[in-house]
Amino acid sequence: MTTYETPSCAYCPDTVRACRSGESDARGPGYCPSKTDAEGIVTAEDYFRDPFEARVAQVSAVVESEGYCKWTRVEEICQFAKRMGFRKVGIATCISFVDLSRVLSAIFESHGLEVASVACKNGGVPKEEIGLKDEEKIRPGNFEAICNPLSQAELLNRAGCELNVIVGLCVGHDSLFIRHSEGLVTTLVAKDRVLAHNPVGALQLADTYYSRVWGPDKPAKLPKLPAEGRKGG
């Protein structure tokens, strides 16, 4: 349940969004981070405590600006990697996306980048070895290899990848990969087998075709907190 005790930006009315104009203190609702946890807001000064993080922040902002509504995400990743001065890029791919990852690898190489790529099923570790029962497999009675994101991270770390790109890893497997990757991580493809890998479609159609996404406590109407909250708003 949303409260006025924690940041709740998801409920900020589209007529407010005060942080965009630098007016959080004056116009931010009571559940705005500027009101609920001002000490937790990182300032520009904090980025400069680490020169690498400052560089990432700067380059990201420039790529956003120059490519705004012009560059595809593939182009943005290429530009980001090149402007950061990265030499080697890794691709952590779902095995079902290997053909597309081949295209992506060639695109990166065409921009002068070195590429290493690792599919999720590398090692061919049986699912039984991580404690799954046969009936918990996708196809019981058959051999099924685990997705191996820890191995993907280790192999790309050993290859010296400075930026790793996720292509279609499963929910949770992507989390483990990100946790163990030594290089920066960005996502090109978020897997959604039902929606042609466009997971935002479930949100756009949550009240029609994909109403099943709601839990048992679905509100009668999507809740909207008032712009003025009980705390400092």
Image (cartoon, grey):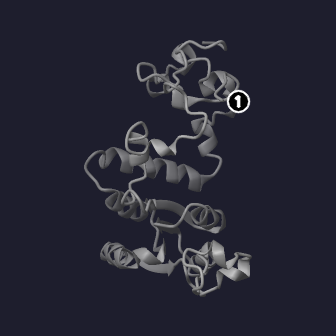
Residue appearing at x 41%, y 19% in the figure: 15
Query: On the picture, is 77 further left or further right than 94?
Result: left
Residue appearing at x 30%, y 76% in the figure: 110
Residue appearing at x 57%, y 37% in the figure: 44
**Regarding mark 1 in the picture, which secondary structure is present there?**
helix
Identified by mark 1, the residue type is Glu
- Above or below — where is 106 with respect to 53? below
Q: Give the number of marks.
A: 1
Question: Camera-side residue: 54 or 175?
Answer: 175
Specify few, some or many for label 1: CA neighbours under 10 Å numbering under 14, 14-19, or 20 or more: few
- Above or below — where is 90 with respect to 222? below
Q: Which residue is mark 1?
A: 39
Task: Choose top left, top right, bottom left or bottom right for residue 37.
Answer: top right
Task: Choose top left, top right, bottom left or bottom right for residue 155.
Answer: bottom right
**Can residue 150 be seen by looking at this rendering?**
no
Is the N terminus in the top left, top right, bottom left or bottom right quadrant?
top right
- Above or below — where is 133 with respect to 33? below
Residue 73, horizontal then vertical, whole percent: 35, 57
Query: On the picture, is 148 further left or further right than 91?
Result: right
**Can residue 37 be seen by looking at this rendering?**
yes
Residue 101, horizontal then vertical, whole percent: 39, 75
- Above or below — where is 160 with respect to 216? below
Task: Choose top left, top right, bottom left or bottom right for residue 24.
Answer: top right
Residue 94, horizontal then vertical, whole percent: 48, 73
Residue 14, horizontal then vertical, whole percent: 42, 24
Is the C terminus in the top left, top right, bottom left or bottom right quadrant?
top right
